[in-house]
Image: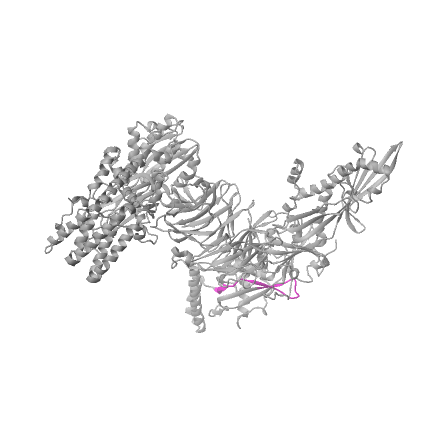
Amino acid sequence: MTENQNLGGFDMVLGLSQSTINFQFKMLYQNGFIKDRWFALVGNVLNPKEGEKPFCFEGTPEELKSKLNRWISIQDQFSAAYDADNIDDMVELKNIIKTEGLNFDYAWDVDLKSPTVEIINKDPRNLYFNLSFSEGKLYYRPEKTSKVKLFDLSGCVYAFTTPIGRIKVAKDQMVMEADEAMDSIIRNSGLTEADFRIESLFLNFENANISDFDIGRSKFPEGLIQPFQVTIENYFKLILKGSTNPYVLGYGVTQPKINSQEAMFQPTSLEFSTSYSTKTDQAKPVKGQYSSFNFLMMLNGDPAPTEPTAGILPASLIELGMDTSSTTDGVFAMDRSHFDQYLDSLDEYVVSVFKAKKDVKVESGGFQVKDGKHIMVATSHMAGGELGDDKIDTTYTLERKALKNVSGGVEVEYEFQVEIVVHLIAKVFVEIELKKIDLSTSGQYSYRDVKGPGKVGSMKFLIQNGTEGKFNLKNTLEPPKIAFDESVYLFEGGALKIFLNIVKLILAWPILLVEGIINQIAIDLSNNDVTKENESIKRLREVDVLNQTNKVILPLGKTYAYKNLRAIEDKSLIAYDITYAPVNE
Amino acid sequence: MNLAQENIVSKEDQVRVNFSSELMSNYFPESSIKGSKEIRTFMVGPDQPLIFYQDQDDLLKAILRKEGSESGWISFSLSEGAVKSYELEYNIKKGRIQIAKVESNQVWVSQALDVASTDFEKLEQALSWTALRADTFAETIDKVSLGTQHVLFGTSSKSSDALFYLADLKELKPESYTFPEHAKTILQFELGTYAKFPGVFFLYQIGNERTLLFQSFPDEEYDRTYDSRFVAEETLNCFALLELPSGNDMIYAAGNQIHQFKGPENGEQGTYETLPGVYQQVHQIRAASFEGENSVWALDQAGLFYQTNRFFNQVSQEFESGKWTRPLLMVEGVSQFSCVKGKGVRNQLYAVSTAFGSELTRLWQDSVTTLWNTNKVTLSDLDSLKEVESYSAQVRFNTASKLASFQGQKVYLSAESNLFIYVDSQSYHLGPDHKVAIPLGIVPEFTIIAPVEEIGAPTIVMSADFLENEKVIDLSGKIFDKLQSKIDKEGGLANAKKQNGKSLIPDGVKPETIKAAQDGIGQMLGIARDMGRGKTPVLKATSFAVGGAGTSGVSINSLASVSSDFGHSLGDFLHSIWNKAKEAFEFVMEKVADGVKFIIKIGEQVFNWIVKTIREIGSFIQRVFDSIKVFFKDLFEFLAFLFDWDAILDTKRAYKGFANNAIINLKGEIGNIRNFINETLEKEIAKFSPELVSIPKELDQTNLTESSKETEPDPRSNWLNSKKQYLNSGKGDEPVKKMPTELSDVFNSLMADLVPIFKETGEGFLSEFKIVAEKFNQVIRGQLSFGEFLKFALQKLAGTGLFILKQLMDVILRSLEALMDVANIALNQVWNVPIISALYREISGGDDLTFLDVMCLFLAIPSTILFKIGENYAPFESEEVKVAFVERGKNIFQLT
């Protein structure tokens, strides 16, 4: 299968907007999943002596406050004693520091804002992660002999680059690993919807946050650079090591448990990239509303592309959005060729209806490409019984037309042609064909109950997005109409007489067969126009031959809501508008 | 009339209270509300519900509970045409209420009414509306929802997805929004809050499935919405929101089960829980919370069910929070309902059900006893009459001190548990926390009517400044005694006959069952009696079984199998489970420290409660009767006081004949009376004292009303008296206008004649005369005898100078003569008195009511009843007596 460069070589890509991610972070922050305050005293981290282990004092805010004040006061005295070279005082104060456990290097007492991410222009493998402080102070003791310095962190931003290109997904927890073995774990264990939830994404970024501090994007007062960077990095490292509280920001954030359903297009591997977009909504411009964070997916266990350009999309998918209003969050797209998998299931169904009819044979067992057309040919040959020596041959030709974008979804149309040939046979030792009468959907002539002109039938399936990644099918049926290819009145006397004898049978058999097929499809698709319903049809319904509405077609249906299914033929894409709308169950 | 302070009755006056209660039928001029749709309720005050509903023509109506009004409700009309949907929103923080409705494909939004300062009795005038429209005419506005800051409406159209519109209530400029899926029809939406985001909860149809979605309003910073879907393992039909203390909403969604979704809060993930119990397609659900207790009301094909997370633990006899009870079927065949909670009323529900004749009915659960009560919501309607089975109690106050007046004094009523009663035909809510003040008039008495639907009734507590102690009115006590004595007298329940002679217990009930029930009832009546006297109940037997079960199957030991997973309170149990239980049941009664423990075994399940009130015992007694197929209707026929209308009508006819004769005769006697007055006045010219004037005895006896002299009160005798205020309960009409015109003409011409006299005598006399005129008015209304009036008038006017007095008496007597001319006609003219005319037509078999009939009826009812009670036969059963009495009317006014 050729790789679709519009999807960076991947089979499917889900593009989530930067503004959505930041808004969802805000939700986590507002609801207490992300820490909104750092209040900690940390010791034994700057130039520790041998045997001194880093520690973080824990307690109630009141205890922390009193400890902090005590530390500042003792350290002030110590510094004064040091400056005055007062050894006795220093010894005594050192004792206090030791017994009261005041050997802190720094302390935080700050309120944080909701963290944000920023997608970087021309860098699809990294993004900025910004940590902003609304107010509060950093208390810092550069040397054991110095006073505690206070830094006001109001309005400060700590930004760092998160290398998302290297993130891969493991089942239990997202960890930053470039391990080769991980891919196979993912493939075997299967991805779950949880991997696509904002919590996972957050944990993912959060895990990466110890890396590249970005001085240029960060904001803090003069003289704070060094202590700020040192303390933050140290704090992250220290806290991350403690297993009981592994996340600095994501305290409380855990991967949600979701009962995933396997979809027809079930991804088997997941990687990430970003696409920067300069586009903004004229009416309500928000930074990054068209920039996309991409979930890059492969299907059927196929290996992900590895070339340098893999995962780099020529443009943000969100620019392809049909509804880009505030209720949507991005675009999901898949390679057009994969969507044929779904269309094939429609074909299979249509074929099965013909196959189920007695005396009908389907050529080559199904649809085939003939003269560049996607068609199915079925034939039936009737002879004997009431027909006597006469024979009737019927050919049904169904052609699946190109996908058509219509209001509310895409339309698949099957054109339905019928040709009937009636052979009037006289059997005198050998069969002699007296007359061949042709009827077809392109016939023009009427006779008795056969009313011309004929008309090609049409079955249209409107595929719409349903709930949770399912499709809703709406169908319309225009039954084919059959008429005589030449005027019956032109028949010569003898032939006409014979013809008149079997005209009833023509009407009864082949035409009824066509009607039967149409009926069957109509019933299967719950078309209300059909009133006849027998036991076997009921059973058929229960078996759910074609009840595609209960089949999950698209993955992540419990995390995203889909709408506006459409084909973008020039990009060879099938695209949807998505909304991040996780299911509570 | 201002009374001097020393004349007001006080504790020193040794006021005696007499009361008596009777089970009987009562009539009210009320009509019920039929076939209403979409009921919504708002509590204007802690106990004052304002109920909105769509009537049979989809017009939007509202009714407001009004304590002390006639039916207890006043009504409003809030739309001109059919209303498709409407909603109320109460802004708790600001204390404002706002209404929105869909009428003629437009959304109408009212202004926000400040609840504290709005006079809800003038709701109609107080509301002003602003209209909103959808973007295109092709769209049909289906529904409207209202929040504290937004109004929301949904539209549908043939060719495209459904849309919803949101408008800020300040701007009222609607903006349309799409859904994240292809929603075709919006089934329900409600404004609410989820995960701290304000937004909208939607339930919409997509293909053959449905989605329940929360969508926040777009975030100002990021212009994104927060979306969350709620999924149960079934198709959802409806949902309800319940605001949590955090401000977030809890979601109760229903299909065949009820699912509770709680969103994320304080670092905790959201939760999803399915409540116990299975329904048959719930199509409406409401949730309410009161003091931490959540209740869910769900309407399905069978009826209205109720579930609460206040779980009654049978073992500890206490409520546990957080555990859900199973659903209880509260009302069958319900089509609409609305529920609220309030002070003293644990649950309150307004429902339209076929079980109640599709009339708007209130079901409410008393917070003290947890018992359920039903009553139909009625509107005061003078053209309609409603019969109500009730306990009626007449309360009278007496004091030895003749000077002490009760007028304007207040009597405070409350009750051991909650109930809704009428006091002198005005509706009130009484309860432990609901004390109402009843003002007394000149006649210190009032009638309490407590509608009941079973034999039990709470006791009423009465207090007043002039009473030494609180007095307790035990409404059911007398009936309980009567029940016991009737059972004893008639030789057991099995032989008991109703007043119509039919057997109380229907055929087919086994004798041993009746015997068991009789024993049990006897026990319970004993307990009730002891409780009523404040004594510790003494128990003889402790167990009995009804319905054919073994006689001693239950013991305290079987409590091991207590049905602890049900968690129903006594009231819930009796209301629902008992009524549905077809199996036999057994009782155990056990004395415990703070009451009596009742243990009931139904089938294999054992329930037990400690009961502390007479009301609860009454409820149990009723259930025991129910189990031997004796229902309240039967007990009513067995125990209630039933009127003998024919005897009353006979009495009235005799009085009427008497009065007609008296009037004809009075005319001839006027001259004599005038002479008498003139003589008296002239004789006593220097030393006039009206006390010395002897008014002929007969004249003084023409009292057309029952006096309030000290007699034993009897609610039966005062039955119609309690309705007398309908005569004056003006819907704005002056008393004069209610009189037949002939009478009022005389009255007017009298006033015209008096004007020159007033001019001559000045203001002082005018004010004196107004008092006299008021008295005369009372004569006309039958509240004062003519003799008493005459005495009063002479006394009042004595100081004004004899010449003027003579002139005045002349005018009055001339008027009286004129009055006599018209009296015959006027008194016998058809008169439309609210309620009484309708009632009279009913009891007399279609006769019209005249002014005279009214007066005679007032007299006839109590006197017939009293006579019958005393003599055992009606006063005019004998035709001779009747004729003689009527004849006596001819000389009643003769002075000589």
Q: Can the viewer see residue B744 in this picture?
A: yes
- Front residue of B143/B745: it is B745
Q: Which residues are magenta?
A: A104-129
Question: Residue extending furthest top?
Answer: B511
Q: Left or right: where does residue B267 sit relative to residue A189?
A: left
Horizontal and vertical percent for residue B586? 39, 31
Q: Is residue A52 visible?
A: no
Residue A123 belongs to the span the image colors magenta: yes
Residue A457 x/y as whole percent? 74, 47
Residue B887 point in image, percent of width and height: 22, 38
Query: Which residue is at the front of the view, A88 or B370?
Result: B370
**Above/below status of B889 relative to B177:** above
Q: How is the image coloured?
A: one colour
- Based on the displayed image, in which of its 4 quarters is residue A124 positioned? bottom right
Relative depth, front residue between B853 and A138 = B853
Left or right? Give the position of A502 relative to A536: right
Q: Position of residue B252 (x, y in %)?
A: 50, 48
Type of secondary structure dominating the magenta stretch: strand
Report the label total. Answer: 0
B318 magenta-colored: no
Relative to B329, A527 lies left or right: right
Task: Judge whether B300 appears above or below A139 on screen.
Answer: above
Along the viewing direction, whichever of B884 and B792 lies nearer the viewer: B884
